[in-house]
Image: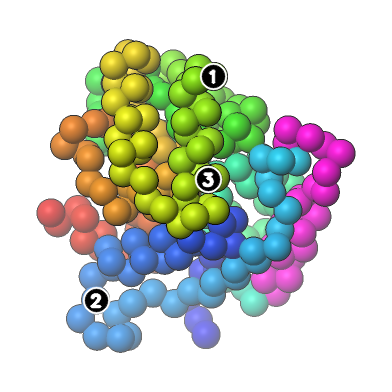
Amino acid sequence: MENFFTILGGMGTLATESFIHTLNKRTEAHRDQDYLNYIVVNHATIPDRTEYIKNPSLENPEEKLIDDIKIHSQLSPKFFVVPCNTAHYYFDEMQKATEIPILHMPRIAVDSIGRHFSDAKRVAVLATEGTILTGVYREALEEQGYEAVIPDEELQEKVNRLIYQEVKENRNLNFELYHEILSDVASKMNCEVTILGCTELSVLYDAYDLTKEYNIIDAQAETVHRTLSMMGKNDLLDDN
């Protein structure tokens, strides 16, 4: 197979499925051959990234991530996509393991803010505790002159429950809790934009369109846009 990319997924599986669904939905295609060539690696048994970041005595997922990069680099994809925000804690080491570019989902999300919300200054980040602790979004936002705002303990508990108990454990797309969290950000955090920095939140973003009510940047959706661009395809969302 020529002219393809590799999706290094399974973190979690529903989020990987959502990325693929969004990618295919936004690809301009009139026949089978118009869709993109890609390989999906659903490595579901990679240890939990957030659990390790919070407790380094647990199994470190880095070795398995780097092994996957090395193994699949042998097939010579054009680039890798890693649809897990927290896994970008290991981005530098993964990129050192291959000459093939790896798309950096948090940086892509931050890059897109100006395209959608040119006047934004304060940006809220909703993500796993692991992603928050790594500082990958804070660093990317501050590099571009934005103020990064993270949830307080009460709001983070709601985000954790939505990601882990609702989506990961029970496959429940809890609209009420999702809407409540976005409402809390808008009313209490005084932010112009909210970044959804977890691919489980991206599953909810894809299921419920709240973009007319809230200014949202979904990291997964923006990475889909970048993927289409790099593969020379039009993004059907741009035509709407």
Residue appearing at x 80%, y 55% in the figure: 63
Q: Please, what is the three-letter code of the amino acid marked with disc 3?
A: Gln
Magenta stretch holds residue 67: yes
Q: Nearer the viewer, residue 239 or 168?
A: 168
Of callouts 2 and 1, the N-terminal one: 2
Of callouts 3 and 1, the N-terminal one: 1
User: What residue range appears in magenta?
Assistant: 53-74
Q: Which residue is mark 3?
A: 165
Residue 129 image position (x, y, % from top left): 60, 32
Distance (Cα) linking label 3 and label 1: 17 Å
Would residue 135 appear left or right of 182 to someone viewing this image? right
Q: Which residue is mark 1?
A: 153
Q: Residues within 10 Å of mark 1 (few under 14, many from 20)?
A: few
| Element assignment for label 3 | helix
Residue 220 makes an appearance in the image: no
Q: Nearer the viewer, residue 64 or 101?
A: 64
